[in-house]
Amino acid sequence: MSALKKLANKFIVIEGLEGAGKSTAISYIDKWLALQNMPAEKIVYTREPGGTELAERIRDIVKMEVQGETLQDKAELLLMYAARVQLVEHIIKPALADGKVVIGDRHNYSSLAYQGGGRGIDMALIEGLKQLSLGDFTADLTLYLDIEPELGLSRARGRGELDRIERQAISFFQRTRAVFLDLVAKDQNAFTIDASQTPLLVEKAIFTQLDNWLASLN
Ligand code: T5A
């Protein structure tokens, strides 16, 4: 089967802590897809939380700080899934049904890692919420960009002021990272990329993972 046929209807997700280089990695995936002769109109890009008009408004709420009112951890979790349902139903599923390839900047693993690991919400509760809102819908490939939180945050700081979540203590990101690593270790469709390497080496590692994955598809 041709590479283009294999890639039709595939949902590729990039995960990682802040400053891991997810946006940068998406440009490498783009380059790799061009090498497979994928037409630009066959590629859909999403980000989470966000990606639809309503989901982008939820993203604003999640990122903002309101004086005198703390966003409760469970409210934060529910907002992440509210945004995700909007995105999956309005953008991702229709694009996949139309034979497109979707590249997602974050998806479900971010909720397990940040809200489960970072915030300490019961994982079973999050899994239940995922089932309720998305059923068995899942990514075809997840590339997790692994980085020490200190390094990631210093990169994130370099590109502007930190938002509400980015201002959490380092221990929050250490717990988040531990869950990401655990999830990837248990998922045969997920792979870790060392994001502390130079951009050139990260690009090379991503190309290798994508080549191997493509070769594994029937
Ligand atoms: N969230 C999200 C949850 O809590 N639960 C959820 O379910 C979901 C979906 C989303 C926030 O919401 C949370 C997680 C987040 O806190 P976001 O804006 O999508 O926020 O995510 P961020 O991680 O904040 O995005 P960033 O823009 O910070 O990170 P990226 O995209 O990973 O990094 P990128 O590519 O912009 O690179 C950052 C800087 O590093 C440089 C780049 O040039 C850039 O300046 N860089 C490198 N430098 C050196 N070496 C390399 N290899 C480099 N790669 C990139």
Image (cartoon, rainbow, N blue to C red):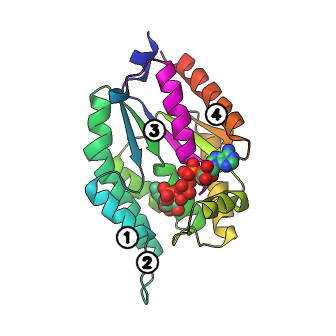
Residue at the image point whose x is 44% and y is 11% from the top: 2
Dot 4 beta carbon under 8 Å from ligand 1: no
Residue at the image point whose x is 41% and y is 57% from the top: 49
Helix, strand or loop at label 3? It is loop
Specify which label sits upstream in the sequence, 2 or 4. 2
Rendered image quadrant of residue 38: top left
Q: Residues within 10 Å of mark 3 (few under 14, many from 20)?
A: some
Is residue 123 rendered to the left or right of residue 67? right
Specify which label sits upstream in the sequence, 3 or 4. 3
**Distance (Cα) linking label 2 and label 4:** 37 Å
Report the residue marked by disc 1: 61
Determine contact: label 2, label 1, CB under 8 Å.
yes
Specify which label sits upstream in the sequence, 4 or 1. 1
Please state which amino acid type lies under the numbered disc 2.
Leu
Residue at the extreme front of the image, as rendered: 159
Report the residue marked by disc 3: 139
**Distance (Cα) linking label 3 and label 1:** 25 Å
| Ligand 1 sits in quadrant | bottom right
**Distance (Cα) linking label 2 and label 1:** 9 Å
Between disc 2 and disc 4, the foreground one is 4
Tell me where the magenta segment starts and ends, as one range. 12-39
